[in-house]
Image: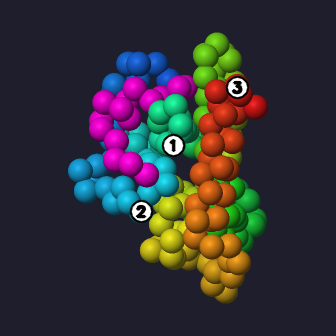
């Protein structure tokens, strides 16, 4: 992913107001981000623990999506879960349901769409093997090359962003 400026990131959000985009906190390590290892930018808002944000590169410019974690704690008996973006398997606490308000009038009325993602939003690092999930039994063996895993991850997140924007 190409490096983005703070201004580009704030202007990219499609499902929040300009005021909310102005007030959101960027990642604490923003100046040191390893852009060459990122396929998208994802972070939890340090000022609001139930909020997170992702910014995806697109041909027509970056698209940012504000996410929320439901306040009710997860009560699943499932021992492991899989991220719907990068398909990394995690122990149950390693995947979180993120809900995104829809863009426009539908979002202002409270309509949302959700997806299960790596809790730390570090999909780019997991698919490159730079970070390992805490899953008993280890990782499943991937048969896809890195380029194909990157394409799959970005494609899955793009499909989610399209749903937020009402394109799917």
Which residue is most to the left?
A: 31
Quote the CA–CA distance across marks 1 and 3. 16 Å
**Residue 9 belongs to the span the image colors magenta:** yes
Residues in magenta? 1-15
**Residue topped by disc 3:** 166
| Mark 2 residue crowding within 10 angstroms, few (<14) / some (14–19) / many (20+) | few
Quote the CA–CA distance across marks 1 and 2. 14 Å
Residue 46 shows up from this direction = no
Residue visible at 70% across and 25% down? Answer: 166
Which residue is most to the bottom?
A: 137
The picture places residue 122, in percent across and down from the top left corner, at 49, 60
**Marks 3 and 2: in contact by CB < 8 Å?**
no
Residue visible at 75% across and 65% down? Answer: 77
- In this rendered view, identify the residue nearer to me: 80 or 57: 57
The picture places residue 127, in percent across and down from the top left corner, at 56, 69
Q: Quadrant of residue 143?
A: bottom right
Q: Nearer the viewer, mark 2 or mark 3?
A: 2
- Does 56 sit left or right of 141 as displayed? left
Q: Say what secondary structure mark 2 lies in.
A: helix
Which residue is most to the front?
A: 59
**Residue topped by disc 1:** 56
**Residue 79 belongs to the span the image colors magenta:** no
**Marks 2 and 1: in contact by CB < 8 Å?**
no
The picture places residue 14, in percent across and down from the top left corner, at 53, 26
Tell me, for residue 162, which label it has, or none: none
| Mark 1 residue crowding within 10 angstroms, few (<14) / some (14–19) / many (20+) | many
| Mark 3 residue crowding within 10 angstroms, few (<14) / some (14–19) / many (20+) | few
Please determine whether, in this image, residue 13 is positioned above or below residue 152.
Answer: above
Residue visible at 64% across and 27% down? Answer: 165
Quote the CA–CA distance across marks 2 and 3. 29 Å
- In this rendered view, identify the residue nearer to me: 72 or 159: 159
**Residue topped by disc 2:** 37
């Amino acid at each position: 992913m190409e490096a983005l400026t703070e201004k580009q990131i704030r202007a990219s959000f499609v499902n929040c107001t300009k005021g909310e985009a102005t007030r959101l906190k960027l990642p604490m390590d923003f100046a040191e981000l390893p852009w060459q290892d990122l396929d998208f930018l994802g972070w939890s808002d340090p000022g609001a623990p139930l909020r997170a944000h992702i910014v995806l590169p697109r041909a027509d410019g970056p698209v940012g999506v504000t996410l929320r974690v439901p306040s009710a704690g997860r009560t699943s008996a499932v021992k492991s879960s899989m991220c719907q973006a990068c398909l990394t398997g995690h122990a149950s606490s390693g995947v979180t349901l993120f809900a995104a308000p829809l863009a426009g009038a539908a979002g202002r009325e409270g309509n949302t769409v959700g997806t299960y993602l790596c809790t730390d939003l570090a999909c780019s690092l997991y698919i490159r093997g730079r970070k390992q999930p805490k899953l008993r039994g280890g990782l499943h063996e991937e048969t896809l090359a890195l380029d194909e895993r990157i394409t799959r991850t970005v494609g899955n997140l793009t499909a989610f962003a399209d749903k937020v924007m009402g394109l799917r």
